Image (cartoon, rainbow, N blue to C red):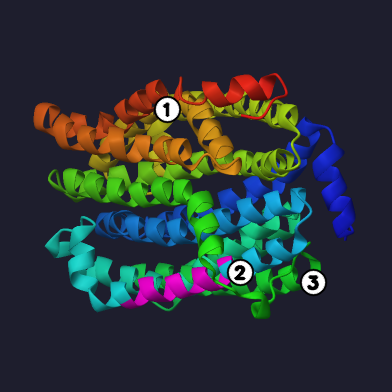
Amino acid sequence: MPHPAEDLRRLREAPVRGLILRLAIPTIASMLISAFYNVADAWFVGRLDTASVAAVGVAFPVMAVIQATGFFFGHGSGNTLARMLGAGDRHGARRMAAVGLVCSALAGCLLAAAGLLFLRPLTLAIGSPADLLPVTAPYVAIVLLGAPPMCAALTLNNQLRFQGKATLAMVGIVAGAVLNCLLDPLFIFVFGWGVAGAAAATALSQTVSFLLLWRLNRRAAVVPVRLRAFAPTRAALGEIVRGGAPSLFRQGLACVAMAALNHAAAAYGAAALAGMGIVTRLTQFVGSALIGLGQGFQPVCAFAYGARLWRRVYEGFRFLVTAGGAFLALVAAVCWLWAPEVVDCFQTGDPLVTQVGASALRWQMATLLLSAWIVPCNMMMQAIRKPIRASLLASSRQGLCFLPAIVLLPLWFGLDGVVAAQSLADLLAALLALPLPLPTLLPLRQGQQA
């Protein structure tokens, strides 16, 4: 394994494009595999019936909240420790790693306890029709039991990534995903647990991921987590909040948005709920690749900003927009052309599910390319500690733009309004994101502090 000093030298001196790709490839794999937990559950449950597919789609906001918590502490502590390493402060970086991990695990415990205590009202709140509760509630309950290790695993994954250890971070996530794919058919079909088996496979797999990431962190991180370094000072917690708030806004509002989408789609029956749930998971899977590329950029960006290498930050941002745009254009073309076939991979052949899902997927693909500007802007602002602008960008798509759209469009256009709401939100978010980063990008381009 590379010596920590070599990792730091590479972050400072290696060519930006190659360095981002080197860090991004395992990170993209990690993000895709994290999203694959949801896609795998949908694929295996899709062999059961439409009600089960709908139930898994309804439960998606709960997974989003757990992931939001893990990303909040992982990005908040990871951004800060990367800047500290860039400035030569190893002691502060070590303290930040411990505070981020311990607080993440504790937050996961609180989520699990609160969710299980209010399981029925929670399940109804995220959009489950009353007749689907016997299927949805067990799935949600088991996912909640896995919240503490899931939050901790995501935090460790991001801390390793921000230290230039993206390949090691990927290993822990891959191991859990492979186990999940093996356990899904075993628990769902062989043991006969149905949709609850999919949740059990996810919770157990995430626990294995955490244990492996903990071991890798102790052996190979630049600043390994030491529990004795846990010192939750106001300053340390403030750094986590400032660095992690954009991720929390982005993922947390995604939960609210998906709950609103569930409620809107449920008015048109289980088939509409199932179709929209399939598209939600697919678009999250595609978006995870772009976010993974951005997360390969973030350690470079945060380290370079801490080391006052302003031009290096701009070069990385420009590469991220170009590469992300090329990737999303290709995905959008493929999914547009074969939308019905893609949707049918995740359900039992219900024509209504195919109709709703294919229409929603094509609407999503029409505006997918806009994310190639929105996401990089958000990730750069987050990495260089511009929390207000980063949080505004992170909350714009799912909050400021989507929530009004999902309320108003169905009133005017019925089910067609439900299907088109996310595309309208993409367009409005892109209009907001177009001018917001310019005051930061212009001085960075000139090699000056933003």
Q: Residue 365: which numbered mark, if any?
A: 1
Q: Where's residue 12, x and y in %? A: 82, 41
For residue 376, above or below residue 28: above
Q: Amino acid at mark 2?
A: Ser
Residue at image mark 3? 219
* Residue position marked by numbered label 2 in the rendering: 209
Few, some or many C-alpha atoms within 10 Å of disc 3 (few <14, some 14-19, many ≥20)?
Answer: few
Residue 158 x, y percent position in the rendering: 62, 56
Q: Amino acid at mark 3?
A: Arg
Residue at 36%, 23% in the rendered image: 427
Q: Look at the image and give the residue range highlighted in magenta.
A: 100-113
Instruction: Note whether 427 is above or below 14 in the view shown.
Output: above
Magenta stretch contains residue 104: yes
**Between disc 3 and disc 2, whose residue precedes?**
2
Q: Is residue 302 left or right of residue 187?
A: right
Q: What is the x, y in percent for residue 382?
A: 54, 42
Query: SS at mark 2?
Result: helix
Give the mark toward the camera: 2 or 1. 2
Q: Nearer the viewer, residue 181 or 332?
A: 332
- Kindly report which numbered mark, 3 or 2, lies closer to the viewer in this rendering: 3
